[in-house]
Structures are given as structure tokens and as C-alpha cells.
Image (cartoon, rainbow, N blue to C red):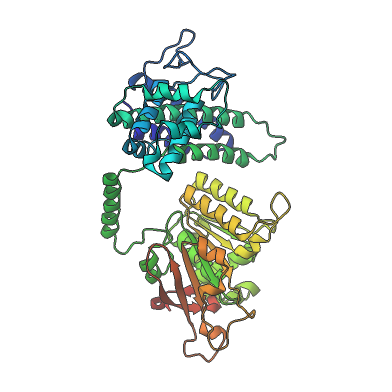
Amino acid sequence: MASRRQIQTISVWLAREANVEDSQYSISALMRLWQSAEEARLSVLRRSDIGEVRSETSPDTPEIEGDADVPTSNQNKVSDTPEKVDLEAERRVLAAMLKSPDATADIIEIISAQDFYDLDNRETFRAICLLHSEDPRSVNFSAVVHELQDYRVGDFDGVGYLRGIVEIETNPRDAERDAEIMRRASLLRALKEVGARIASIGSTELPDAGGDEDALIDSAEEEVQKLVQRYSPKLDAGYRWEVVLDEIEALGAMPHHPSGVPSGFPKLDAIIGGFKPGKLIILASASAIGKSTLGLDFIRSSAIAHKMPSAIFSLESEEVEISKRVLAAESRVPVNRVNSGTLTDDDWTKVARRMADVTSAPLHIFDQTDLTVELVVRQCRRLWRRQGLRLALVDTIQALSMQPERGGSALNLTTLLHQFRTMAREINLPVICTARLEYPNGRPDVHDRRPKLDYLAPALVEMADVVILLHREDAYDLESPRAGEADLIIAKHRDGPTAVVTVAFQGHYSRFVDMGES
């Protein structure tokens, strides 16, 4: 019998196939994989408890099993194409739910209303779930009939229908097995539907040579992601803890290596574990403190020091300006001399030493003045598919939030952050967004200039997994005894403690460094 993990493998396999170099090949590859999945589907059905695949006209066309009163197109049928279903399993599940609150609690952990093929059965399941959520003891024949009184499809007779369900002999202990059969059949139907939709996307004709091929692939990928998210099985408690312990052991074997993308600051990594996959990180400060420079330091660590594909989306600086700052920071050459072209012979020697590493780094810079959330998300997905993108930096989030989207209006900050967070989790990509602090009087308090979460937009605080506030005393007092120092204030950390990490600021090189390097 096929397990849920085997079924999930088909879906995950389908998602992985999008990771190819050529756009048109991606769509055709998905279609080839769909054909393989269809063959696997038939193989699974032959071995499963649902029944043997058989058809008088074609071996690839499954029949509907169960009661002879199969839904027709003008009654309560879900689709026009007969699918492999087990209507008797659906009825046995409902019978168990009507007779046992414990069975209901177990069943709703396995299936949802969408897993029912028959609309009458689906609506009855919803009614039982509603009653069970209010009071498990309230689920009885009369209560369910009452809940179904507004359900009018064809000549549906609620009383007669439920009597037929109640008369079914079933053992509540077998209900989970029937629910698994239903879920497996529902997955196979969904696989076929997704394959058809991807086929439709693949046959879309580009209007011209400049058509957006990535948009087509994004649409195909979105269909697959929905399928994987819906049918990915929940880990049982034993297996979940096994995974957790394995991860702890793996981290223990590499005590000096962060679990996420290294930030370039060991003390910071010791607290947050590097920039972990799927996390949204907010890096905020007052104006002219250096948040863009620090964000660039994080990207340099990822792309240059560790050769991890990384991307910068900037509405604050142009690509050439960013590249000059990267070169100055890596070569330890004053940025003003790089900008003016007045390098000394010694400067040129330093630049030459670092050029090979800098130019070979998988660093992508996007500085379009018309950058939008949609474009950022699309580029991240494209780089993830083609190169395995590991880190993205958006500079700054407020500037991006003011950019008009396709409809002509700007997104509110909450919607924008939700899109980034969703994308980050779907492709396991840490996303860093720089942000400006908003002070009550437009500037820091003279008596207490240290940044606080209160000065950050509530949506940023709410949506972020990690918030790092950057502070430099010498930005306000050149004679400060802490001149050349900067505090990375970890003001929010969803997975661990908050803390303050002190680093050195080397403004003339346009970079921050660990105190041990200064």
C-alpha cells in the first residue's frame, strides 16, 4: 500500500523540477514530470485499497467505485470527468463521525471537506465539524438534519440521506483508515487538476519575443506550491522529535558555524544563528547611521566570503555606487578615493588582490527606479530556481512601499511584508529589509538617542522574525568616548534571546567589522 510519504514525494518531485536553467524547458519539464506522476498514480491505485484501475475504453481512465447512484453533471457532481473515488469510504467516515466524538476528532486531523468527492457527503462533513467545534456531545441525527436544512441541491432529502448513513455498519477504529483512503484519492484528483492547469500555462502563447517567460513559470510554480502545502503530511510526534534531535546534533557537531547564512559577525551569529531560511529580518536605524552599509556587509559575507548566491534590491543607490562601496570595503581602500578615482599605487595593489573574489562572487544588484514588490518577489524566485538564492536584501522597505504596483496604487506596509514573508517561507530564503526609524518629533531625543522598537512601524515589528536596531553614539557626538563603535541591538528575536552586539564602524572604508578585526 502506498504511504502518504510516497504520495508526497510525487508532489515534491514535481516542485523540484522547476529548478532548471531554461524557462521554456521548465514548463516542458513540468509536463514530463506530470506524465511520470500520472503513471505513478496508476501504479499506486493498483496497489492501494481503493481498488484496481479498470476501464472498458482506456486503461488510463479510472472508474468510480461505490454506490450505483453516482453523481451526474446536473446533480451533485464535483467535476464532469469521473475520478477515482470511494464513495463507500466517504459514507463510512461520516457514519463513524455521527457515532463517535473521538472518531470525529481523529478524522478531522486527516481530511478536510475538500477531500470529499460527493457534495452531499461534503456538506454533511461540514455540518458535523461545525457542531463538533461547538460541543462534541451535540453531534446527533437531529442536530445534523437541522444544520442541513438550508442545503438544497437537486432532490436532496436530508432525513432520508442521514438515515442511510446511520444504518451503515462501521467500526470507529477503522475510520482513520477510510480517511486515509479518501485523502489519497483526493490527492490523486488534485494532481490531475494541477497537471491540466500547468498544461494550459505551458500552451500559453507569448505575445512577442519580449514576453515575460518568468511570469509563466511563476504561475506553474504557484500551482505546485499550493498542492504541496495542502497535502504535505503533518509529522507525527515521534518523527517530529527525531528531526529536532537530529538537527541539534548536527549543530553541535559544528559549534562555530551558524545554522543560517553567516552575517560576517560571529557574536551576532552566536545569538541569532545566522540568517535562517524563511526568516524576515528588519534592520533599522535613524537616517545617516549606516543601515545600508551594514546590510551590504551582510551581503558581502554571504556572496563574497561564502560564495552563496545573494541579491540586493536598492531604491537608495545605483548599481555602480553599490559596486564601488563593495570594492572599497573588500580592498580596505578609502571609499572617497574610489569614488574620485584618486587611488595610490598601494590602493591599486589592494584592489588587485581582491578583484578575483569580488568579480566571481554570485552577487546580483537590482537598482531599477520602478522596483515593485511583485518584481522583487519574481526576481527572487527566478534566482532561487536558477542559482539557489540564499540571501536577499531590500533597501529600504519604506521606499518600496511607496512604489505603485500594477494596478497603479501602492501597497500598504502590512500587505507588502506579508508578500515577502510568504515568499521567504515558500522558498526558504532569508530576507533582510532595511527600514528608517520614525521618531515622535522627527528626530532622536537629545537625552536618549538609543533606538527602540516603539520608533518602528507596528507592522514591521509584528511581521519580523528578527529586528536589529543600529546605533552609533559618534553620529551625534564626535567627541564621544565610544567613537568608532556601533551597537547592533537585537530588539526582537522570535527564536531566542535579545542582546546587544558591539562592532566597529570603519566609515572611511564603508563597512562595519567585528571588534576583533578593527
Can you give x and y, in whole percent of width and height, for residue 468 in the image? Answer: 48, 70
Q: Residue furthest top?
A: 56
Q: Between residues 450 and 414, which one lies in front from this camera angle?
A: 414
Horizontal placement of 78 versus 178: left or right? right
Look at 31% across and 25% down and name the residue there: 170
Q: Between residues 174 and 137, which one lies in front from this camera angle?
A: 137
Look at 54% across and 35% down and name the residue there: 26
Q: Residue furthest bottom?
A: 479
As drawn, 112 above or below 399: above
Q: Which quadrant of the structure image shows residue 411?
A: bottom right
Q: Residue furthest right?
A: 408
Q: Which quadrant of the structure image shows residue 373?
A: bottom right
Horizontal placement of 399 versus 474: left or right? right
As drawn, 367 above or below 477: above
As drawn, 32 above or below 441: above
Q: Is residue 355 visible?
A: no
Look at 46% across and 74% down and name the residue there: 488
Can you give x and y, in whole percent of width and height, for residue 371 in the image? Answer: 66, 56
Q: Quadrant of the C terminus?
A: bottom left
Q: Which quadrant of the structure image shows residue 175?
A: top left
Q: Is residue 163 visible?
A: yes
Q: Between residues 507 and 344, which one lies in front from this camera angle?
A: 507
Q: How many marks?
A: 0
Q: Quadrant of the N terminus?
A: top left
Can you give x and y, in whole percent of width and height, for residue 260 in the image? Answer: 40, 58
Q: Residue furthest front?
A: 142
Can you give x and y, in whole percent of width and height, for residue 208 in the image? Answer: 72, 36
Look at 42% across and 12% down and name the residue there: 54
